Image (tube, helix red, strand yellow):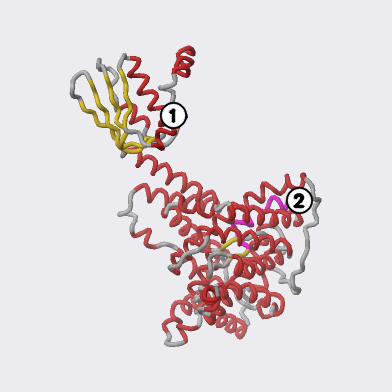
Amino acid sequence: MRKSIKKEWFSTPKSDLLAGLVVALALIPEAIAFSIIAGVDPKVGLYASFSIAVIISFTGGRPGMISAATGAMALLMVTLVKDYGLQYLLAATLLTGVLQIIAGYLKLGNLMRFISRAVITGFVNALAILIFMAQLPELTDAPAAVYLLTAAGLAIIYLFPLIPVAGKHIPSPLVAILSLTALSMALGLDIHRVGDMGTLPDTLPIFLLPEVPLNLETLRIILPYSIGLAIVGLLETMLTSTIVDDLTDTASDRNRECRGQGIANIGAGLVGGMAGCAMIGQSVINVKSGGRGRLSTLSAGVFLLVFIVFLGDWLKQIPMAALVAVMIMVSIGTFSWDSLRKLKSYPLSTNIVMLSTVVVVVATHNLAIGVLVGVLLATLFFANKVGHFMVVKCDETPETERTYKVIGQVFFASTEKFTASFNFREAIERVTIDLSEAHFWDVSAVTALDKVVMKFRREGTEVKLVGMDEASATIVDRFGLHDKQAEIEKILAGH
Protein backbone atom coordinates (compact mmCIF):
# COMPACT_ATOMS: atom_id res chain seq x y z
CA MET A 1 0.00 0.00 0.00
CA ARG A 2 2.74 2.43 1.03
CA LYS A 3 4.78 1.55 -2.06
CA SER A 4 1.76 2.14 -4.31
CA ILE A 5 1.07 5.54 -2.73
CA LYS A 6 4.69 6.58 -3.16
CA LYS A 7 4.70 5.48 -6.79
CA GLU A 8 1.44 7.24 -7.69
CA TRP A 9 1.99 10.41 -5.66
CA PHE A 10 5.64 11.09 -4.99
CA SER A 11 7.71 9.40 -7.69
CA THR A 12 8.44 12.74 -9.45
CA PRO A 13 7.19 15.51 -7.11
CA LYS A 14 9.14 18.41 -8.65
CA SER A 15 8.07 17.62 -12.20
CA ASP A 16 4.48 17.06 -11.06
CA LEU A 17 4.29 20.42 -9.28
CA LEU A 18 5.74 22.35 -12.23
CA ALA A 19 3.49 20.52 -14.67
CA GLY A 20 0.47 21.28 -12.47
CA LEU A 21 1.44 24.96 -12.52
CA VAL A 22 1.45 25.02 -16.33
CA VAL A 23 -1.84 23.15 -16.56
CA ALA A 24 -3.51 25.52 -14.07
CA LEU A 25 -2.56 28.53 -16.20
CA ALA A 26 -3.88 26.82 -19.34
CA LEU A 27 -7.12 25.81 -17.61
CA ILE A 28 -8.24 29.33 -16.75
CA PRO A 29 -9.18 30.73 -20.19
CA GLU A 30 -10.69 27.42 -21.27
CA ALA A 31 -12.84 27.12 -18.13
CA ILE A 32 -14.08 30.67 -18.71
CA ALA A 33 -14.74 29.98 -22.39
CA PHE A 34 -16.65 26.77 -21.62
CA SER A 35 -18.76 28.64 -19.04
CA ILE A 36 -19.67 31.18 -21.71
CA ILE A 37 -20.61 28.36 -24.11
CA ALA A 38 -22.90 26.82 -21.48
CA GLY A 39 -24.44 30.22 -20.73
CA VAL A 40 -23.34 30.47 -17.09
CA ASP A 41 -21.09 32.74 -15.03
CA PRO A 42 -17.30 32.10 -15.46
CA LYS A 43 -17.00 31.05 -11.83
CA VAL A 44 -19.18 27.98 -12.57
CA GLY A 45 -16.54 26.60 -14.94
CA LEU A 46 -13.61 27.71 -12.78
CA TYR A 47 -15.00 26.18 -9.57
CA ALA A 48 -15.83 23.01 -11.50
CA SER A 49 -12.30 22.74 -12.87
CA PHE A 50 -10.79 23.24 -9.40
CA SER A 51 -13.00 20.72 -7.62
CA ILE A 52 -12.92 18.06 -10.35
CA ALA A 53 -9.13 18.20 -10.66
CA VAL A 54 -8.64 17.94 -6.88
CA ILE A 55 -11.16 15.15 -6.33
CA ILE A 56 -10.14 13.06 -9.35
CA SER A 57 -6.52 13.14 -8.19
CA PHE A 58 -7.64 10.94 -5.27
CA THR A 59 -10.47 8.93 -6.83
CA GLY A 60 -9.40 8.48 -10.46
CA GLY A 61 -7.87 5.41 -12.05
CA ARG A 62 -5.38 7.18 -14.31
CA PRO A 63 -2.53 9.08 -12.57
CA GLY A 64 -1.36 12.14 -14.48
CA MET A 65 -4.61 12.69 -16.40
CA ILE A 66 -6.31 16.09 -16.06
CA SER A 67 -10.07 16.39 -15.64
CA ALA A 68 -12.02 19.65 -15.51
CA ALA A 69 -14.83 21.53 -17.24
CA THR A 70 -14.78 20.75 -20.98
CA GLY A 71 -16.27 22.08 -24.20
CA ALA A 72 -17.85 18.74 -25.14
CA MET A 73 -19.84 18.76 -21.89
CA ALA A 74 -20.64 22.48 -22.09
CA LEU A 75 -22.32 22.05 -25.46
CA LEU A 76 -24.81 19.60 -23.91
CA MET A 77 -25.78 22.07 -21.19
CA VAL A 78 -26.83 25.01 -23.36
CA THR A 79 -30.53 24.13 -23.72
CA LEU A 80 -30.93 23.10 -20.07
CA VAL A 81 -29.44 26.38 -18.81
CA LYS A 82 -31.43 28.44 -21.30
CA ASP A 83 -34.78 26.81 -20.47
CA TYR A 84 -34.45 26.09 -16.74
CA GLY A 85 -31.47 28.00 -15.35
CA LEU A 86 -28.31 27.29 -13.34
CA GLN A 87 -29.93 25.43 -10.44
CA TYR A 88 -31.23 22.70 -12.74
CA LEU A 89 -27.76 22.44 -14.27
CA LEU A 90 -26.30 21.82 -10.82
CA ALA A 91 -28.95 19.15 -10.16
CA ALA A 92 -28.15 17.53 -13.52
CA THR A 93 -24.46 17.59 -12.59
CA LEU A 94 -25.17 15.67 -9.39
CA LEU A 95 -27.25 13.09 -11.25
CA THR A 96 -24.52 12.80 -13.89
CA GLY A 97 -22.09 11.86 -11.15
CA VAL A 98 -24.45 9.22 -9.76
CA LEU A 99 -24.91 7.66 -13.22
CA GLN A 100 -21.13 7.56 -13.77
CA ILE A 101 -20.57 5.86 -10.41
CA ILE A 102 -23.15 3.24 -11.39
CA ALA A 103 -21.39 2.81 -14.75
CA GLY A 104 -18.13 2.18 -12.90
CA TYR A 105 -19.65 -0.51 -10.69
CA LEU A 106 -21.23 -2.10 -13.77
CA LYS A 107 -17.70 -2.19 -15.26
CA LEU A 108 -18.75 -0.30 -18.38
CA GLY A 109 -15.17 0.93 -18.69
CA ASN A 110 -14.37 -2.49 -20.15
CA LEU A 111 -16.40 -1.55 -23.25
CA MET A 112 -13.38 0.45 -24.42
CA ARG A 113 -11.98 -2.75 -25.92
CA PHE A 114 -14.68 -2.53 -28.58
CA ILE A 115 -13.35 0.80 -29.86
CA SER A 116 -10.81 0.13 -32.60
CA ARG A 117 -7.44 1.83 -32.94
CA ALA A 118 -8.67 3.56 -36.11
CA VAL A 119 -11.49 5.22 -34.14
CA ILE A 120 -9.11 6.30 -31.38
CA THR A 121 -6.71 7.74 -33.96
CA GLY A 122 -9.58 9.59 -35.62
CA PHE A 123 -10.72 10.92 -32.25
CA VAL A 124 -7.21 12.14 -31.44
CA ASN A 125 -6.75 13.82 -34.83
CA ALA A 126 -10.18 15.46 -34.66
CA LEU A 127 -9.51 16.78 -31.19
CA ALA A 128 -6.15 18.17 -32.30
CA ILE A 129 -7.91 19.99 -35.14
CA LEU A 130 -10.59 21.34 -32.79
CA ILE A 131 -7.97 22.55 -30.32
CA PHE A 132 -6.20 24.40 -33.13
CA MET A 133 -9.47 25.82 -34.50
CA ALA A 134 -10.38 27.08 -31.02
CA GLN A 135 -7.28 29.32 -31.14
CA LEU A 136 -8.19 30.96 -34.46
CA PRO A 137 -10.49 33.65 -32.97
CA GLU A 138 -7.49 34.94 -31.02
CA LEU A 139 -5.46 35.08 -34.24
CA THR A 140 -8.12 36.59 -36.51
CA ASP A 141 -7.83 40.34 -37.21
CA ALA A 142 -5.39 40.61 -34.31
CA PRO A 143 -2.64 43.23 -33.89
CA ALA A 144 0.80 42.34 -35.24
CA ALA A 145 2.05 42.02 -31.65
CA VAL A 146 -0.23 38.99 -31.13
CA TYR A 147 1.34 37.12 -34.04
CA LEU A 148 4.84 38.03 -32.88
CA LEU A 149 4.14 36.91 -29.31
CA THR A 150 2.57 33.66 -30.51
CA ALA A 151 5.59 32.93 -32.72
CA ALA A 152 7.94 33.82 -29.86
CA GLY A 153 5.97 31.54 -27.53
CA LEU A 154 6.27 28.60 -29.95
CA ALA A 155 9.99 29.28 -30.34
CA ILE A 156 10.47 29.20 -26.55
CA ILE A 157 8.37 26.05 -26.18
CA TYR A 158 10.37 24.10 -28.76
CA LEU A 159 13.86 25.58 -28.24
CA PHE A 160 14.06 25.97 -24.45
CA PRO A 161 14.28 22.16 -23.87
CA LEU A 162 17.55 22.23 -25.86
CA ILE A 163 19.23 24.32 -23.15
CA PRO A 164 21.41 22.13 -20.89
CA VAL A 165 20.16 21.43 -17.34
CA ALA A 166 17.42 24.12 -17.15
CA GLY A 167 15.74 22.90 -20.32
CA LYS A 168 15.31 19.45 -18.82
CA HIS A 169 13.94 20.52 -15.46
CA ILE A 170 11.68 23.51 -16.18
CA PRO A 171 8.63 23.03 -18.45
CA SER A 172 9.06 25.15 -21.55
CA PRO A 173 5.33 26.13 -21.70
CA LEU A 174 5.70 27.69 -18.22
CA VAL A 175 8.76 29.62 -19.36
CA ALA A 176 6.85 30.82 -22.43
CA ILE A 177 3.86 32.02 -20.39
CA LEU A 178 5.97 33.87 -17.80
CA SER A 179 8.33 35.40 -20.40
CA LEU A 180 5.58 36.66 -22.68
CA THR A 181 3.57 38.04 -19.75
CA ALA A 182 6.57 39.97 -18.49
CA LEU A 183 7.37 41.23 -22.00
CA SER A 184 3.83 42.38 -22.75
CA MET A 185 3.56 44.17 -19.39
CA ALA A 186 6.94 45.84 -19.84
CA LEU A 187 6.03 47.08 -23.33
CA GLY A 188 2.46 47.97 -22.36
CA LEU A 189 1.05 46.11 -25.34
CA ASP A 190 -2.63 46.66 -26.10
CA ILE A 191 -3.57 43.03 -26.72
CA HIS A 192 -6.17 40.51 -25.56
CA ARG A 193 -5.42 39.19 -22.08
CA VAL A 194 -6.92 36.60 -19.71
CA GLY A 195 -8.73 39.38 -17.83
CA ASP A 196 -10.69 40.18 -20.99
CA MET A 197 -12.22 36.68 -21.05
CA GLY A 198 -14.54 37.33 -18.11
CA THR A 199 -14.72 38.26 -14.43
CA LEU A 200 -12.64 36.05 -12.16
CA PRO A 201 -14.16 35.06 -8.79
CA ASP A 202 -12.52 36.53 -5.69
CA THR A 203 -13.94 34.15 -3.08
CA LEU A 204 -13.54 30.48 -2.25
CA PRO A 205 -16.33 28.16 -3.39
CA ILE A 206 -18.92 27.24 -0.78
CA PHE A 207 -20.97 24.08 -0.23
CA LEU A 208 -24.52 24.33 -1.56
CA LEU A 209 -27.42 22.18 -2.70
CA PRO A 210 -29.32 22.94 -5.92
CA GLU A 211 -32.47 24.94 -5.24
CA VAL A 212 -34.86 22.76 -7.23
CA PRO A 213 -38.03 20.87 -6.24
CA LEU A 214 -37.29 17.29 -5.22
CA ASN A 215 -39.99 15.63 -7.33
CA LEU A 216 -40.47 13.50 -10.44
CA GLU A 217 -40.95 16.56 -12.63
CA THR A 218 -37.41 17.72 -11.82
CA LEU A 219 -36.12 14.23 -12.55
CA ARG A 220 -37.97 14.22 -15.88
CA ILE A 221 -36.27 17.49 -16.83
CA ILE A 222 -32.70 16.68 -15.83
CA LEU A 223 -32.50 12.92 -16.56
CA PRO A 224 -32.08 13.18 -20.37
CA TYR A 225 -29.35 15.79 -19.95
CA SER A 226 -27.62 13.79 -17.22
CA ILE A 227 -27.60 10.64 -19.34
CA GLY A 228 -26.04 12.55 -22.24
CA LEU A 229 -23.47 14.21 -19.98
CA ALA A 230 -22.58 10.90 -18.33
CA ILE A 231 -22.08 9.12 -21.66
CA VAL A 232 -20.07 11.90 -23.33
CA GLY A 233 -18.02 12.45 -20.19
CA LEU A 234 -17.10 8.79 -19.81
CA LEU A 235 -16.44 8.38 -23.53
CA GLU A 236 -14.04 11.32 -23.67
CA THR A 237 -12.44 10.21 -20.41
CA MET A 238 -11.88 6.63 -21.56
CA LEU A 239 -10.42 7.76 -24.89
CA THR A 240 -8.16 10.27 -23.14
CA SER A 241 -6.98 7.61 -20.70
CA THR A 242 -6.02 5.41 -23.65
CA ILE A 243 -3.94 8.25 -25.10
CA VAL A 244 -2.21 8.95 -21.77
CA ASP A 245 -1.59 5.21 -21.38
CA ASP A 246 0.26 5.27 -24.71
CA LEU A 247 2.20 8.45 -23.87
CA THR A 248 3.38 7.14 -20.49
CA ASP A 249 3.53 3.43 -21.32
CA THR A 250 1.46 2.64 -18.25
CA ALA A 251 -2.00 1.15 -17.65
CA SER A 252 -5.10 2.73 -16.13
CA ASP A 253 -8.02 1.33 -14.16
CA ARG A 254 -10.93 2.40 -16.36
CA ASN A 255 -13.74 1.27 -14.07
CA ARG A 256 -12.18 3.11 -11.14
CA GLU A 257 -11.87 6.12 -13.42
CA CYS A 258 -15.62 5.92 -14.17
CA ARG A 259 -16.41 5.93 -10.46
CA GLY A 260 -13.86 8.67 -9.83
CA GLN A 261 -15.37 10.91 -12.51
CA GLY A 262 -18.77 10.40 -10.92
CA ILE A 263 -17.53 11.37 -7.46
CA ALA A 264 -15.72 14.40 -8.92
CA ASN A 265 -18.85 15.61 -10.72
CA ILE A 266 -20.91 15.25 -7.56
CA GLY A 267 -18.27 17.33 -5.80
CA ALA A 268 -18.41 19.94 -8.56
CA GLY A 269 -22.19 20.18 -8.36
CA LEU A 270 -22.03 20.70 -4.58
CA VAL A 271 -19.77 23.77 -4.92
CA GLY A 272 -21.67 25.40 -7.76
CA GLY A 273 -19.70 23.90 -10.64
CA MET A 274 -20.74 22.31 -13.93
CA ALA A 275 -20.10 18.70 -14.94
CA GLY A 276 -16.73 17.89 -16.50
CA CYS A 277 -14.51 15.06 -17.67
CA ALA A 278 -10.95 14.31 -18.75
CA MET A 279 -9.30 16.88 -21.03
CA ILE A 280 -6.98 15.58 -23.70
CA GLY A 281 -5.31 18.96 -24.29
CA GLN A 282 -4.45 19.61 -20.65
CA SER A 283 -3.52 15.96 -20.14
CA VAL A 284 -1.03 16.19 -22.99
CA ILE A 285 0.34 19.46 -21.56
CA ASN A 286 0.73 17.75 -18.20
CA VAL A 287 2.54 14.71 -19.59
CA LYS A 288 4.79 16.73 -21.88
CA SER A 289 5.64 19.05 -18.97
CA GLY A 290 6.78 16.08 -16.89
CA GLY A 291 3.60 15.33 -14.94
CA ARG A 292 3.18 11.62 -14.30
CA GLY A 293 1.63 11.21 -10.85
CA ARG A 294 -1.53 12.15 -9.00
CA LEU A 295 0.30 15.11 -7.46
CA SER A 296 0.32 16.85 -10.86
CA THR A 297 -3.49 16.68 -11.09
CA LEU A 298 -3.95 17.78 -7.48
CA SER A 299 -1.52 20.68 -7.85
CA ALA A 300 -3.24 21.82 -11.06
CA GLY A 301 -6.52 22.15 -9.16
CA VAL A 302 -4.96 23.81 -6.12
CA PHE A 303 -2.89 26.25 -8.20
CA LEU A 304 -5.98 27.10 -10.23
CA LEU A 305 -7.92 28.08 -7.11
CA VAL A 306 -4.99 30.05 -5.67
CA PHE A 307 -4.53 31.92 -8.95
CA ILE A 308 -8.14 32.93 -9.49
CA VAL A 309 -8.88 33.88 -5.87
CA PHE A 310 -5.61 35.36 -4.60
CA LEU A 311 -3.60 36.28 -7.68
CA GLY A 312 -6.39 37.40 -9.97
CA ASP A 313 -4.85 40.82 -10.68
CA TRP A 314 -1.61 39.26 -11.91
CA LEU A 315 -3.41 36.49 -13.72
CA LYS A 316 -5.44 38.94 -15.76
CA GLN A 317 -2.20 40.24 -17.30
CA ILE A 318 -1.32 36.97 -19.06
CA PRO A 319 -1.59 37.60 -22.81
CA MET A 320 -3.88 35.19 -24.60
CA ALA A 321 -1.14 34.87 -27.25
CA ALA A 322 1.00 32.98 -24.72
CA LEU A 323 -1.77 30.47 -24.05
CA VAL A 324 -2.51 30.23 -27.77
CA ALA A 325 1.12 29.22 -28.33
CA VAL A 326 0.79 26.51 -25.67
CA MET A 327 -2.44 25.16 -27.17
CA ILE A 328 -0.95 25.14 -30.68
CA MET A 329 1.90 23.07 -29.25
CA VAL A 330 -0.72 20.74 -27.78
CA SER A 331 -2.57 20.39 -31.10
CA ILE A 332 0.67 19.64 -32.95
CA GLY A 333 1.74 17.11 -30.34
CA THR A 334 -1.70 15.51 -30.15
CA PHE A 335 -2.21 14.96 -33.88
CA SER A 336 -1.09 11.52 -35.07
CA TRP A 337 1.14 12.50 -37.98
CA ASP A 338 2.07 8.86 -38.40
CA SER A 339 -1.52 8.12 -39.43
CA LEU A 340 -1.08 10.39 -42.46
CA ARG A 341 2.19 8.76 -43.48
CA LYS A 342 0.60 5.31 -43.31
CA LEU A 343 -2.55 6.10 -45.30
CA LYS A 344 -1.09 4.32 -48.34
CA SER A 345 -0.05 1.21 -46.42
CA TYR A 346 -3.12 0.81 -44.17
CA PRO A 347 -6.23 -1.06 -45.41
CA LEU A 348 -8.88 1.13 -47.05
CA SER A 349 -11.42 0.23 -44.35
CA THR A 350 -9.08 1.46 -41.59
CA ASN A 351 -8.54 4.76 -43.39
CA ILE A 352 -12.27 5.24 -43.97
CA VAL A 353 -13.02 4.67 -40.27
CA MET A 354 -10.31 7.08 -39.15
CA LEU A 355 -11.18 9.83 -41.64
CA SER A 356 -14.93 9.49 -41.04
CA THR A 357 -14.40 9.92 -37.30
CA VAL A 358 -12.32 13.04 -37.93
CA VAL A 359 -14.81 14.58 -40.37
CA VAL A 360 -17.88 13.95 -38.19
CA VAL A 361 -16.24 15.23 -34.99
CA VAL A 362 -14.91 18.38 -36.67
CA ALA A 363 -18.20 19.02 -38.49
CA THR A 364 -20.45 18.52 -35.47
CA HIS A 365 -18.03 19.49 -32.66
CA ASN A 366 -19.57 16.48 -30.92
CA LEU A 367 -17.06 13.81 -29.93
CA ALA A 368 -19.73 11.26 -29.05
CA ILE A 369 -21.36 11.37 -32.50
CA GLY A 370 -18.00 11.09 -34.26
CA VAL A 371 -16.88 8.14 -32.16
CA LEU A 372 -20.29 6.45 -32.61
CA VAL A 373 -20.00 6.78 -36.40
CA GLY A 374 -16.46 5.40 -36.28
CA VAL A 375 -17.46 2.44 -34.12
CA LEU A 376 -20.42 1.59 -36.38
CA LEU A 377 -18.26 1.73 -39.52
CA ALA A 378 -15.53 -0.36 -37.88
CA THR A 379 -18.15 -2.93 -36.84
CA LEU A 380 -19.61 -3.12 -40.34
CA PHE A 381 -16.19 -3.52 -41.95
CA PHE A 382 -15.23 -6.18 -39.42
CA ALA A 383 -18.47 -8.10 -39.91
CA ASN A 384 -18.04 -7.98 -43.68
CA LYS A 385 -14.44 -9.18 -43.43
CA VAL A 386 -15.22 -12.06 -41.06
CA GLY A 387 -18.20 -13.03 -43.20
CA HIS A 388 -15.91 -13.65 -46.17
CA PHE A 389 -13.89 -16.18 -44.16
CA MET A 390 -16.85 -18.58 -44.02
CA VAL A 391 -16.68 -21.34 -46.69
CA VAL A 392 -18.72 -24.45 -47.47
CA LYS A 393 -16.94 -27.39 -49.15
CA CYS A 394 -18.83 -30.18 -50.90
CA ASP A 395 -17.81 -33.85 -51.24
CA GLU A 396 -19.70 -35.33 -54.23
CA THR A 397 -18.99 -39.03 -53.63
CA PRO A 398 -20.96 -41.29 -53.75
CA GLU A 399 -23.39 -39.95 -56.36
CA THR A 400 -26.50 -40.40 -54.20
CA GLU A 401 -25.02 -38.57 -51.17
CA ARG A 402 -23.46 -35.23 -50.48
CA THR A 403 -21.34 -34.10 -47.54
CA TYR A 404 -21.10 -30.34 -47.00
CA LYS A 405 -18.36 -29.17 -44.62
CA VAL A 406 -18.92 -25.70 -43.18
CA ILE A 407 -15.78 -23.83 -42.08
CA GLY A 408 -15.85 -20.47 -40.31
CA GLN A 409 -18.27 -18.15 -38.56
CA VAL A 410 -21.94 -18.14 -39.46
CA PHE A 411 -23.73 -14.92 -38.43
CA PHE A 412 -25.88 -12.20 -39.96
CA ALA A 413 -23.17 -11.05 -42.39
CA SER A 414 -22.39 -14.53 -43.75
CA THR A 415 -25.86 -16.15 -43.84
CA GLU A 416 -26.51 -15.24 -47.46
CA LYS A 417 -23.25 -16.83 -48.55
CA PHE A 418 -23.99 -19.86 -46.33
CA THR A 419 -27.40 -20.48 -47.92
CA ALA A 420 -26.12 -19.97 -51.46
CA SER A 421 -23.40 -22.62 -50.97
CA PHE A 422 -25.86 -25.54 -51.09
CA ASN A 423 -27.28 -27.10 -54.27
CA PHE A 424 -30.97 -27.83 -53.69
CA ARG A 425 -31.73 -28.87 -57.27
CA GLU A 426 -29.86 -32.21 -57.14
CA ALA A 427 -31.90 -35.41 -56.83
CA ILE A 428 -29.97 -37.07 -54.01
CA GLU A 429 -31.00 -39.30 -51.13
CA ARG A 430 -28.94 -38.04 -48.21
CA VAL A 431 -27.08 -34.87 -47.22
CA THR A 432 -24.66 -34.63 -44.31
CA ILE A 433 -23.75 -31.15 -43.08
CA ASP A 434 -20.48 -31.25 -41.10
CA LEU A 435 -20.39 -28.35 -38.62
CA SER A 436 -17.31 -29.42 -36.66
CA GLU A 437 -15.31 -26.40 -37.89
CA ALA A 438 -18.16 -23.89 -37.85
CA HIS A 439 -19.79 -21.73 -35.20
CA PHE A 440 -23.32 -20.28 -35.19
CA TRP A 441 -23.48 -16.91 -33.47
CA ASP A 442 -26.98 -15.46 -33.77
CA VAL A 443 -30.61 -16.03 -34.68
CA SER A 444 -29.89 -15.05 -38.30
CA ALA A 445 -27.45 -17.97 -38.54
CA VAL A 446 -29.97 -20.38 -37.01
CA THR A 447 -32.65 -19.17 -39.44
CA ALA A 448 -30.28 -19.79 -42.36
CA LEU A 449 -29.62 -23.34 -41.13
CA ASP A 450 -33.38 -23.94 -40.84
CA LYS A 451 -33.86 -22.73 -44.41
CA VAL A 452 -31.16 -25.08 -45.76
CA VAL A 453 -32.49 -28.13 -43.88
CA MET A 454 -36.12 -27.48 -44.84
CA LYS A 455 -35.29 -26.88 -48.48
CA PHE A 456 -33.51 -30.24 -48.71
CA ARG A 457 -36.36 -32.01 -46.94
CA ARG A 458 -38.86 -30.39 -49.27
CA GLU A 459 -37.00 -32.07 -52.13
CA GLY A 460 -37.23 -35.43 -50.36
CA THR A 461 -33.63 -35.48 -49.17
CA GLU A 462 -32.67 -36.84 -45.77
CA VAL A 463 -30.55 -34.30 -43.85
CA LYS A 464 -28.11 -35.05 -41.02
CA LEU A 465 -26.21 -32.46 -38.96
CA VAL A 466 -22.93 -33.60 -37.36
CA GLY A 467 -20.11 -32.08 -35.34
CA MET A 468 -21.93 -29.06 -33.91
CA ASP A 469 -20.12 -27.56 -30.91
CA GLU A 470 -21.90 -27.07 -27.60
CA ALA A 471 -22.39 -23.30 -27.88
CA SER A 472 -23.83 -23.57 -31.39
CA ALA A 473 -26.03 -26.48 -30.36
CA THR A 474 -27.46 -24.39 -27.50
CA ILE A 475 -28.55 -21.52 -29.75
CA VAL A 476 -29.80 -23.89 -32.48
CA ASP A 477 -31.85 -25.92 -30.00
CA ARG A 478 -33.36 -22.74 -28.59
CA PHE A 479 -34.24 -20.91 -31.80
CA GLY A 480 -34.08 -23.54 -34.53
CA LEU A 481 -37.27 -24.95 -36.08
CA HIS A 482 -36.07 -27.73 -38.41
CA ASP A 483 -36.35 -30.42 -35.68
CA LYS A 484 -39.59 -29.10 -34.14
CA GLN A 485 -42.48 -30.68 -36.01
CA ALA A 486 -45.13 -28.53 -34.35
CA GLU A 487 -43.43 -25.32 -35.43
CA ILE A 488 -42.95 -26.60 -38.97
CA GLU A 489 -46.66 -27.45 -39.21
CA LYS A 490 -47.54 -23.94 -38.03
CA ILE A 491 -45.38 -22.43 -40.75
CA LEU A 492 -46.88 -24.70 -43.41
CA ALA A 493 -50.39 -23.94 -42.17
CA GLY A 494 -49.65 -20.24 -42.57
CA HIS A 495 -49.05 -20.80 -46.24
**Which SS class for mark 1?**
helix
Q: Could you give the CA–CA distance between mark 1 and mark 2, rounded to whole angstroms?
A: 54 Å
- In the rendered image, the quadrant that contains the N terminus is bottom right
**Foreground residue, 152 or 169?**
169
Residue 401 placement, left or right of 491: left
Relative image position of residue 4 (x, y in whole percent): 52, 73
Relative image position of residue 79 (x, y in whole percent): 69, 50
**In this rendering, does residue 136 appear at all?**
no
The residue at the point 34 percent across, 48 percent down is 348
> Please, what is the dominant secondary structure of the magenta stretch?
helix
Relative image position of residue 495 (x, y in whole percent): 46, 12
Which disc number belongs to residue 84? 2
Nearer to us: label 1 or label 2: 1
Q: Residues within 10 Å of mark 1 (few under 14, many from 20)?
A: few
Query: Magenta segment, which residues?
Result: 69-83
The residue at the point 49 percent across, 60 percent down is 129
